[in-house]
Amino acid sequence: MKQEQLRSRVFVIAGLALGIVSLVGTAAASDQARLGFFGGLNRGNMGGDMDRFGNELAAEFEEIGGTWAVTKGAKTGPGFGAYYYWPRSPRLGFQFEAHYARRGVNFDLEGRIEEFEIVGDLRLKLDYFELPLLLRIAPLHAGDQRLVFMAGPVIGFRTAANLAAEIRALGQTSSESEDYGGSFKSMILGAVVAVGVTGEIDRRTSFVLQARYHAGLMNAFDDPEFSSRSSDFGIYVGMEFALGQ
């Protein structure tokens, strides 16, 4: 049932995108198609039941003994990708992307066993290969620089889910990692809004500077007892190259 609902949402988004393309498809495309590459950092967090998920992790530590507590915090991870820009007019077009992003959260761990204090970090890493379809608008143009706005849906495919623990006590450090792929959905939907600047380096090459916000539209957990969605802010730099003559 879940898979059927997910496929239905994907088809709806794809249908809306194709409808928009058909509406503007007759416009004269006086701009050039472009191929771009970008990379940067995501700063993100996950709300909902993620705090409760952290408490469940603390409860697992308490099975060993002592008292434990975790505090959820934001996570910074890499992001990079490539895109094809399809212009439909000098100021309007579509950007088709292939994008890798690391999401997740960090937990600060504090514990006490008898008189000994223990601290550590729990890092939940969720890696996704994403396919954004973005409407790109460039309303302002000043010399060789252009202000760009983008927005659109994202289909994400989870490539990894990992919980890494680093524990420090009595001057010693121990590390352990565990696969948590079974706890999170393999495919999710999201949305992106972005603002950026492109500037011409020469007739065929431009630099790209962009800030974007990604919001998860689905529960990332595959467990119905938990519900959490991602929320990420990213800064990216890159280059794009005009195709054709």
Image (spheres, grey):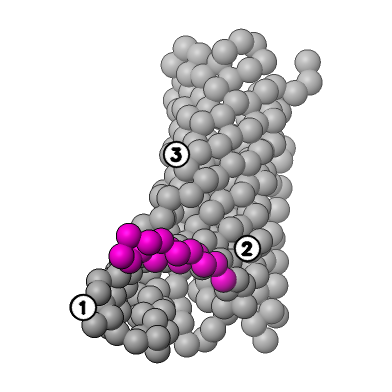
Left or right of 80? Residue 204 is right
The residue that label 1 is drawn on is 115
Task: Identify the residue at image location x=46%, y=82%.
Answer: 226
Label 2: how many residues lie within 10 Å, few (<14), some (14-19) or many (20+)?
some
On screen, residue 194 above or below 237: below
Q: CA distance from mark 2 to mark 1?
A: 38 Å
> How far from the left and from the top, in percent, is residue 12?
65, 66
Of callouts 3 and 1, the N-terminal one: 1
Query: Nearer the observer, disc 2 or disc 3?
Result: 2
> How far from the left and from the top, in percent, is residue 38?
58, 35
The residue that label 3 is drawn on is 235
Label 1: how many residues lie within 10 Å, few (<14), some (14-19) or many (20+)?
few
Task: Identify the residue at image location x=34%, y=87%.
Answer: 65
Query: Which is nearer the eye, 150 or 215?
Result: 215
Of callouts 2 and 1, the N-terminal one: 1
Q: Quadrant of the N terminus?
A: bottom right
Query: Nearer the observer, disc 3 or disc 1?
Result: 1
> How far from the left and from the top, in percent, is residue 106?
39, 62
Mark 3–mark 1 CB contact (< 8 Å):
no
Query: Which is nearer the eye, 191 or 185?
Result: 185
Q: Could you say whether the residue bearing mark 3 is in a helix, strand or loop?
A: strand
On screen, residue 151 above or below 190: above
Query: Which is nearer the eye, 98 or 31?
Result: 98
The part of the chain drawn in magenta is 164-178
Q: Which mark is residue 160?
A: 2
Q: Quadrant of residue 182?
A: bottom right
Specify the amino acid type for callout 1.
Glu
Left or right of 117? Residue 32 is right
Q: CA distance from mark 2 to mark 3?
A: 22 Å
Left or right of 92? Residue 64 is left
Specify the amino acid type for callout 2.
Ala
Task: Identify the residue at image location x=59%, y=42%.
Answer: 80
